Amino acid sequence: MTVSSFPSKKCGIPVKQALEINPDLAMYMTEKGLDLGNSKALLLYNKLILKEFMDLEFDLPEGYLIPTICSRWAFLKYILQFKPLNVLEIGTGASGILSLMLGRLGISVTATEIDEEAIESAGSNFQRNKLQDRITLVKSNSEIIIGLLPQLSEFDLILCNPPQYNEKYYQQHKSSSRGFVGNFSELVGGEKGHEFILALLSEVKKFQAPPPVFFQLTLPKLKPVLEEELNKQKYNFSVTSNRVGTRIRIYYQVKF
């Protein structure tokens, strides 16, 4: 698969068709339909979508963030219009989904991650799909980028699906079984939720001739406070909103 052959069809598989492909989903059916609030059902369904649409497979350790493939799919479609050949992904996660999708399209990726178990899982997913030669995995330290790479100018863009829940919300919901699954570093962006994004941008601008940073906001309520900070710090940014299913995703491009 190449960028030019990236499917233009709408992401998603009707439940009836999904049940035909994977009968194991039947155990998660209720009167209202497929129970995607159940983390096991959510994982199975998203595995199915990724396999059907991009012929990619992934697995996850228990308790890690389950990627919503159609949300990543929509974000990827937005990114591809900028025709990147070499991408730096910040925080690839235990699934490594965005890096996997980019790698499948022939794009070179350097993917960072701070969590040891997530690194092992993402690396296994890259190998499972025979993309380890196209995706370089780098262990982060206490900083996000500083100290990891000598320069950023070799990359066409920096990509991030940042953590954005606040600490209080995470502590209140982390024991929930209704689809809120993920560890602290995957979900929590700081005391208010947007601090990780600001920290990333602050580090990037310390490099000479850095590429633009692209990230998506999955919690629209953060938009006003985030943009207030971006304006206060005089960042050059543009915003694009996109409806993915019933949810709004907000894509940011920040230039330096």
Image (tube, rainbow, N blue to C red):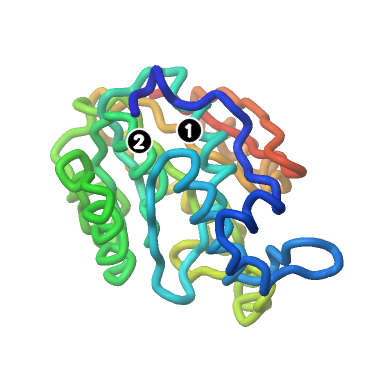
Quadrant for the C terminus, please.
top left
Q: Compared with residue 127, is residue 157 higher up or lower down, i.e. above or below?
A: above
Percent position of residue 59, x then y: 39, 63
**Is 20 or 61 nearer to us in this picture?**
20
The residue tagged 2 is: 102
Q: Residues within 10 Å of mark 2 (few under 14, many from 20)?
A: many
Residue at the farthest front position: 20
* Disc on res. 146: none
The residue tagged 1 is: 76
Residue at x-position 49% and y-position 39%: 53
Residue at the farthest right position: 31
Percent position of residue 89, x then y: 34, 42
**Is 145 or 82 nearer to us in this picture?**
82
Residue at x-position 43% and y-position 39%: 54
Tell me if 88 is positioned left or right of 215 in this view.
left
Secondary structure state at the residue bearing disc 1: helix
> Quick check: marks 2 and 1 in contact, CB under 8 Å?
yes
Q: Amino acid at mark 2?
A: Leu
**Is 227 or 78 nearer to us in this picture?**
78
